[in-house]
Amino acid sequence: MERCLILDFDDTLVSTIDTHANSWKLAIERVLNRDIPIETIMSDINYGMDVLLKKYQLTETESQLAQDYKREIFSKNLHKTKINQLLLWIIKNSQFEKVIIASNSSRENVDRIMAYHNISHELFDLIVTRDNVLNKKPHSDMADLIFKTFPKYNPSDFLMVGDSEVDSTFAHKNKMKCILVKF
């Protein structure tokens, strides 16, 4: 039986992917001064901003400008995100011994969204973001950090709940069960 719950953040606990994608679309369009189809952003959004920035071959200056624009646009659109109330209820009322967030987003972004939705950090025993690891999911770095933080548990004690192939690959590589959810 799984004793620990690992949750992806974006589009699992909080619906954010559409808001992130639209923010990236507008930011990259502003930098490149051309239309970008939303489908091209959506195809790579779960792999993170570095993939998007490489895809459009932005210079370092353009990349920084796009990130600044994206942050500004996203902040103005936080009202378009919403909480997965069922998962929040499970977290608050579960029998899991540990509840962990494992997100490819930045800690700044996770904290900003949690604050906006009044989600208490105290609900989680650990929050791991891309800022804590060298390689994001589906790489094993986040799992290694989680297993190191909670050494009394085996990988089979963890249940991963996510929304994408990135999350299922991450769970599979690290010998954890996985449930994918959709908003």
Image (cartoon, helix red, strand yellow):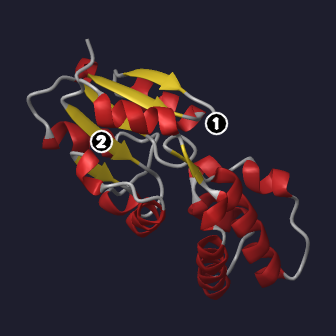
Camera-side residue of 30 and 181 = 181
In which quarter of the view is residue 98 placed? top left
Total numbered labels: 2
Identify the mark nearer the N-term, 2 or 1: 2
Seen from the viewer's position, the closer of residues 31 and 122 is 122
Q: Is residue 30 left or right of residue 103?
A: right
Q: Quadrant of residue 173?
A: top left
For the residue marked with disc 1, what is the amino acid? Phe
Residue type at mark 2: give it: Ile
Residue 26 lies, in percent from the top left, at 78, 73
- Give the position of the N terminus as an image quadrant: top left
Q: Which residue is mark 1?
A: 183
Residue 68 screen position, x and y as percent: 60, 82
Q: Quadrant of the C terminus?
A: top right
Quick check: 149 left or right of 177? Answer: left
Mark 2–mark 1 Cα distance, whole angstroms, equals 20 Å
In the rendered view, would you say 75 is above or below 141? below
Q: Residue at x 25, y 28 (%)?
A: 4
Q: In the picture provided, is 88 more to the left or to the right than 25?
A: left
Residue 176 image offset from top left, x and y in percent:
35, 22
- The residue lying at 91 percent from left, 71 percent from top is 35
Q: Position of residue 174 (x, y in %)?
A: 34, 28
Q: Residues within 10 Å of mark 2 (few under 14, many from 20)?
A: many
Q: Residue reaching furthest left?
A: 152
Cβ–Cβ below 8 Å for labels 2 and 1? no
- Badge 2 is on which residue? 100
The residue that appears at 70% across and 76% down in the rendered structure is 58
Within-10-Å neighbours for mark 1: few <14, some 14–19, many 20+: few
Please tell me whether residue 159 is drawn above or below residue 42 in the rendered image: above
Report the disc number at residue 3.
none
